[in-house]
Image: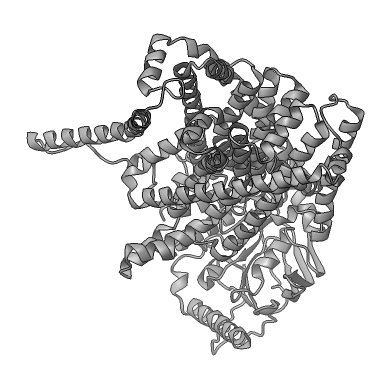
């Protein structure tokens, strides 16, 4: 009677495609090399063509519309400006990055805290549902001037804006995640006599991680955009302020350069967040 | 181990009272389970109710292995869930060792394995097996975990994650976990239901081996008659919804029951008898629909 | 999912939700009246006064309706583009990575950078509509792509065996699988459309709730400002509610196609 199953274990290494050619003929070796090279090339093209596409459309738009530089700069002007002043955007970008990440973490913390509360108390869950709905429909970006009035025209408001934008998606997704435990696990925990606290720490929390990270992925870009708006309106430090100043002085190349950098910050954060989300799905699902 | 023989032979005629437990001393440990006239009613939408179980009475002796079989929807899983404290009976009482199932659960004296193995996908095999200790607030007994890993034949896979294991291996982990705290009652709800026939047969033998190492009061819900006869001391057949005890058969074979036993005429007779009964019950309930 | 965690009966749940909303209003009232955060926050009673005032109410109501119209129009266009892009990418997967990136970049364009571009290409009245469309595009696009790809492989295989054409496969398998997640994204994107419309108004037009908000702020007419803000929330709630009903219908009919 065998006690260990002979069935193959689907380890990751089994599914990795075998690339090495076992044939000794040089022709198949060359063919493989070409195949690999083509794949790499296609990969690069896949990533690069959108940027090229944007450049072409942008350049065409300026040239065909004959737009003066005071209205909108030619992409070459922006590239030139960035090339000539490489370090100038870095400080602003780092400022914005710092503030956004801080705000996002703060909002996420608040969202997780409230989601945890609603897990422990079903009354809290029902009671929170209405304010959550209202604030989900609250256009945070449009209330930036109000928030600035209340909390001051400074960095703190930007952090609050980023936190508010992040808070609601995190709350909703984490709550849902805490309740979507793997099949049978909630029953199993109960039969084994686990206390509510243990059920929360050992089951609900790990179950919620993938969705929590997805909610961060979804809100991080909006947080950047909202923070930029807040900085722009208030004249606080960062890319938004830089943009506002440049726009006011009609230094369009500089202004659009700031926008480009802001977009890069957003795309970067999105990339980080989506990688984390993908990792979480592999690890926790 | 029952000594009564239920097959018809010309030389002996035994009258066996099939509704009371056999007068046999079970050598295992564990506590008794008593289901007294239990019923379970579920509330559906729009004020409709359904009686999953009604007027069900059954006593399980300490150390006895009972299999619950019956047509789909007969409420056998519901009965198990009531013993496990996951459901409350609408009428009647369920007691385990004289106390409520909920008390047994909170004293961590129950072990359970479900059809969906309910392993934590983010933990390793070892970590999953440590779980009962963590849930009971006790220090992890690494030696026992190691010995159970070996007992279920998963040595070398301690650090694998459920995703990397086959269905049969996952169920082994689930079963090892269910007995980790040496529970007084073991509840198994179609643990092998999702596996192919070959694996299921192999794991049945495994379960017998594991159970014989520490025979404890066990209730197994299954739809597989062969499995029930391989493992149980008594087989309880439930009627279709609303479920109640329809028939009980003692299983006369001595343990350990090998695959040779499954080829004996007595075994085939029992299989036929039970299967026919199940067919009749299923047909009857289908006609009622 | 365990539903045993739900509080009480449905009626009790509604009461609890109601009390949550009431609590919010009470806190707002206290904050407004006690001026603990300064005079910038007007209490709900002041807002009600504005709505009750026959002189001030029409401005806000007309403005709110104007914004709502822009938001709905923009939502429609943004959703249309998102669905077309999603269908395109599903039909021609080699473009997927590139278009995904373009969409991410588009979503990362700050409002304040988008505004000059839109102003240069659209007339002032249409800028809020265009801005609203831009705000919803990414969310819906992601959902469309994910949804169209979510039909279980088994369903696809069944279709191959039965010799179904690509367009009937699209119609009968992929679209039904996509509907639940797309319906959810439409619901979630609706408030975003309103944000886009209001910000578009700030940069473009003189009608709509955006200018009302800004003017009230500048002239420090806080009750009007808060009334304007409340009206955007109400508009958003109503439109969100409509989309939620549609989402419910889509879920009931089509949920489960991915399993």
- Residue C153, above or below A145: below
**Where is residue B71 drawn, in percent x and y?**
59, 76
Name the image quarter holding the C terminus of chain B.
bottom right
- Residue B31, above or below B1: above
Residue B47 found in image quarter: bottom right
On the rendered structure, is C186 left or right of B90? Answer: left
Which residue occupies 54% across, 48% down? B173
The answer to whether residue B123 of the structure is visible from this angle is no
Q: Identify which residue, B164 or B35, lies in the foreground.
A: B164
Q: Identify which residue, A120 or A107, lies in the foreground.
A: A107
Which residue occupies 61% across, 63% down? C249
On the rendered structure, is B215 left or right of A74? Answer: right
Residue projecting furthest to the right: C34
**Where is residue C101 drawn, in percent x and y?**
41, 36
The answer to whether residue B113 of the structure is visible from this angle is yes
Which residue occupies 73% across, 63% down? B82
Q: Identify which residue, A62 or B47, lies in the foreground.
A: A62
- Residue C66, above or below C119: below
Residue B116 found in image quarter: bottom right
- Residue A189, above or below A142: below
Q: Identify which residue, B93 or A159, lies in the foreground.
A: A159
Name the image quarter holding the N terminus of chain B.
bottom right
Which residue occupies 55% across, 28% down? C112
Snapshot colouring: one colour
On the rendered structure, is C203 left or right of C15? Answer: left
On the rendered structure, is A38 left or right of C250? Answer: left
**Where is residue A58 drawn, in percent x and y?**
37, 30
**Where is residue B118 drawn, in percent x and y?**
58, 51
């Amino acid at each position: 009677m065998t006690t260990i199953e002979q069935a193959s274990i689907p380890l990751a290494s089994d599914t990795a495609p075998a690339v090495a050619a076992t044939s000794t003929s040089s022709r198949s070796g060359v063919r493989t090399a070409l195949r690999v090279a083509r794949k790499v090339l296609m990969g690069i093209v896949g990533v690069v063509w959108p940027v090229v596409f944007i450049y072409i459309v942008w350049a065409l738009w300026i040239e065909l519309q004959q737009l003066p530089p005071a209205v909108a700069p030619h992409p070459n002007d922006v590239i030139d400006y960035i090339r000539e002043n490489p370090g100038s955007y870095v400080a602003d970008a780092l400022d914005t990055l710092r503030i956004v990440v801080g705000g996002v973490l703060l909002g996420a913390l608040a969202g997780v805290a409230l989601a945890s509360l609603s897990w422990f108390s079903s009354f809290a869950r029902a009671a929170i549902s209405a304010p959550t709905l209202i604030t989900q429909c609250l256009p945070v970006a449009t209330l930036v001037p109000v928030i600035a009035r209340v909390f001051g025209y400074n960095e703190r408001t930007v952090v609050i804006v980023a936190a508010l934008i992040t808070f609601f998606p995190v709350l909703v997704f984490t709550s849902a995640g805490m309740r979507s435990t793997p099949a049978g696990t909630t029953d199993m925990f109960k039969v084994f006599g686990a206390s509510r606290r243990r059920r929360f720490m050992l089951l609900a929390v790990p179950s919620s991680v993938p969705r929590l990270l997805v909610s961060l992925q979804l809100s991080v870009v909006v947080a950047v955009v909202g923070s930029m708006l807040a900085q722009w309106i208030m004249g606080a430090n960062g890319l938004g302020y830089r943009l506002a100043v440049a726009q006011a002085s009609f230094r369009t190349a500089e202004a659009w350069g700031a926008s480009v950098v802001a977009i890069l910050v957003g795309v970067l954060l999105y990339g980080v967040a989506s990688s984390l989300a993908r990792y979480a799905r592999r690890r926790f699902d | 181990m029952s000594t009564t023989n239920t097959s018809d032979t010309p030389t002996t005629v035994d009258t066996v009272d099939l509704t009371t437990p056999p007068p046999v001393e079970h050598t295992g440990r564990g506590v008794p389970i008593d289901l007294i006239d239990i019923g379970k009613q579920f509330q559906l939408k729009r004020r409709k109710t359904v009686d999953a179980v009604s007027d069900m009475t059954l006593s399980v002796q300490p150390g006895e292995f009972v299999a619950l079989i019956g047509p789909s929807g007969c409420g056998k899983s519901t009965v198990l869930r009531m013993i496990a404290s996951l459901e409350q009976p609408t009428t009647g009482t369920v007691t385990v060792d004289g106390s409520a199932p909920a008390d047994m659960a909170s004293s961590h004296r129950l072990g359970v394995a479900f059809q969906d193995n309910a392993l934590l996908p983010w933990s390793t095999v070892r970590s999953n097996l440590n779980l009962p200790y963590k849930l009971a607030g006790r220090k992890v007994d690494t030696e026992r975990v190691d010995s159970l890993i070996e007992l279920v034949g998963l040595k070398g896979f301690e650090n694998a994650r459920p995703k990397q294991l086959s269905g049969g291996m996952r169920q082994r982990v689930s079963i090892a976990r269910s007995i980790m705290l040496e529970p007084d009652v073991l509840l198994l709800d179609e643990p092998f239901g999702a596996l192919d026939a070959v694996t299921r047969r192999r794991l049945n033998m495994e379960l017998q081996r594991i159970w014989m190492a520490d025979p404890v009061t066990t209730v197994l819900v299954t739809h597989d008659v062969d499995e029930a006869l391989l493992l149980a001391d008594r087989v309880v057949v439930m009627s279709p919804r609303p479920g109640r005890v329809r028939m009980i058969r003692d299983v006369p074979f001595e343990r350990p029951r090998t695959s040779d036993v499954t080829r004996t005429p007595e075994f085939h007779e029992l299989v036929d008898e039970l299967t026919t009964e199940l067919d009749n019950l299923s047909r009857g309930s289908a006609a009622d629909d | 999912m365990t539903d045993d965690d739900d509080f009480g009966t449905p009626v009790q749940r509604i009461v609890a939700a109601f009390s949550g909303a009431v609590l919010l209003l009470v806190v707002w009232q206290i904050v407004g009246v006690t001026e603990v955060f300064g005079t910038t926050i007007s209490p709900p009673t002041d807002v009600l006064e504005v709505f009750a005032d026959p002189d001030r109410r029409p401005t806000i109501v007309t403005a709110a309706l104007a914004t709502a119209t822009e938001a709905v129009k923009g939502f429609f266009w943004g959703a249309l583009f998102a669905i077309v892009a999603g269908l395109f990418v599903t039909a021609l997967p080699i473009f997927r990575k590139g278009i995904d990136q373009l969409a991410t970049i588009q979503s990362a364009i700050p409002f304040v950078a988008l505004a000059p571009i839109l102003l240069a290409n659209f007339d002032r009245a249409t800028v809020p509509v265009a801005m609203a469309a831009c705000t919803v595009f990414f969310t819906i696009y992601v959902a469309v792509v994910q949804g169209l790809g979510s039909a279980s492989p088994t369903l696809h295989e069944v279709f191959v065996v039965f010799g179904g054409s690509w367009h009937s496969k699209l119609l009968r398998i992929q679209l039904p699988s996509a509907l639940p997640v797309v319906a959810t994204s439409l619901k979630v994107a609706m408030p975003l459309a309103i944000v886009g419309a209001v910000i578009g108004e700030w940069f473009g037009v003189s009608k709509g709730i955006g200018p009302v908000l800004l003017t009230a702020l500048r002239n420090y007419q806080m009750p009007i400002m808060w009334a304007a803000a409340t009206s955007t929330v109400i508009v958003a709630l109503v439109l969100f509610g409509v989309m939620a009903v549609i989402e419910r219908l889509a879920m009931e009919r089509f949920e489960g196609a991915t399993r």
